[in-house]
Amino acid sequence: MKSPLAPGIRLITSFSRDGWYRGFILFLTFLFYTAYHLSRKPISIVKSELHKNCSTVIPPPDLNITNNETWCDWAPFDQDNYQTLFGILDNCFLVAYAIGMFFSGIFGERLPLRYYLSFGMLMSGLFTCLFGLGFYLKIHSIYYYAVIQVFNGIMQTTGWPAVVACVGNWFGKGKRGFIMGVWNSHTSVGNILGSLIAGAFVSSAWGMSFIVPGLIIASTGILCFFFLVEKPEDVNCTTPQHHSEEERSETEPLLQNSSHIERTANGAITVEPSEVAAEPTEAISFCGALSIPGVVEFSLCLLFAKLVSYTFLYWLPLYISNVAHFDAKEAGDMSTLFDVGGIFGGIMAGLVSDYTGGRATTCAFMLIAAAPMLFLYNYIGQRSIGTTVGMLLLCGGLVNGPYALITTAVSADLGTHESLRGNSRALSTVTAIIDGTGSVGAAVGPLLAGLISPTGWNNVFYMLISADILACLFLSRLVYKEAQGWCRRSP
């Protein structure tokens, strides 16, 4: 009698070859961008160690102390302008990241993604380690740390357009919101791991808070070089369908000249079938990508959504430390709850947008709900541990949900828009435009927080609430279009 296959083997054989490859690529790209975010997080954890209230620290007996409040701080962050200096470091990274992102997508379309990602992760690891070496080499120059941040910001731009383009190549539109909502949890997982790793060393030797994450991202760069597969056809797998037949019949290629164009009620553009041009093979231009419907609106929305998210990324541990009076490690650990909430927020945003077909409406609803939650967190969030935990989880989900949806499923939808007629090379440029615009907000947010925080944390939260409302307003036209579509479909 022939014995049945082992349960594990049955599970393995139940998946097709295409399924295994897709799962493998999803896992690899998840790991890669987790490493990217893991290496960005240490600076926010180390801030509260570079400048703290030294009057509560017992000094070594052989140390001659001239200032009881700053003797344990790391120069040049031992002065009253330390928050401004932290803001400079944040913006050296974020401005370089924002500017570099617009060029990164262009390079990503024209270079093999495997080489591009591997190089970017290796160089990001190098510059992250160099920042940490400042501790062991006893470097106290703000210029050293600022230059390191600039180069690290440029190298970090290699990540996002490349990983989104790779995932977009392997997965069709069907349940893209849910798949990418789960996949995009790499942002929050990276932030959590970065906080925990940096927190483990911050009080004893803060240089290791940078060196260990730097070595991790460099290691993933080596992994990328040996295992990443850019497109399904490279390994004879089936190419996914990026749009439905209904979408094919409703949209016009933007990259063609046509003599008869007709705009329908929902804003779609139709042409005579005979006028459809051949599939483009050249990379799309910057202006061509901007002309794709929805790119400008989602880009401007992301600018303000990312402003809020990155202000929390860089300033939340210091806020918790100052307001709740936690030490650096405790504040870093507590701040990870915001990212835990972000994981669930991204997944829920993907699920709801897949079910309703309303990407813009889902984002707008979460942005509207986030504004009062931020107000409540500032006023009641530190009253008890339970309140702090609950509010951080809720705010993290509402703030990071729209950010996650726009940078993943929306970017992939627009980068494989039917108007491009299968020009998959547009995906990297569209992703770079959307995330690059968002990165301008990511640079402005922490800068404003550094300038405003000396006047009081209340003012920082008013700024964040205003940014949330503005993000929602930029989606109003798209929300109206989606509502029109639902009304037409209703019986």
Image (cartoon, helix red, strand yellow):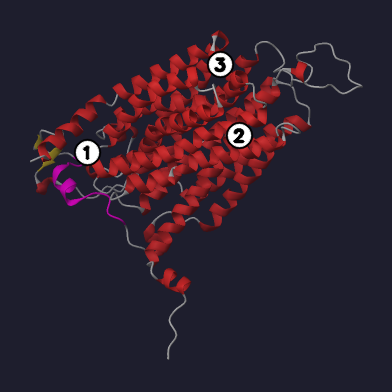
Q: Which residues are magenta?
A: 240-256
Label annotation for residue 474: none
Label 3, label 2: how far apart the Cα atoms are:
22 Å
Q: Nearer the viewer, residue 224 or 343?
A: 343
Across and down, in percent, residue 293 comes to 24, 33
* The stretch drawn in magenta includes residue 41: no
Label count reads 3
Relative to 22, is 118 above or below?
above
Label 3, label 1: how far apart the Cα atoms are:
43 Å
Q: Is label 3 or label 2 in front?
A: 2
Is 17 on the left-hand or right-hand side of 70?
Answer: left
Query: Dot 1 surroundings within 10 Å: few (below 14), some, or many (20 or more)?
Result: some
* First-in-chain label (3 vs 1): 1
Is 245 on the left-hand or right-hand side of 491?
Answer: right
Query: Dot 2 surroundings within 10 Å: few (below 14), some, or many (20 or more)?
Result: some
Type of amino acid at the residue the image marks with label 2: Asp
Q: Which residue is mark 2?
A: 333
Query: Residue at the location (44% across, 20% down)?
Result: 376
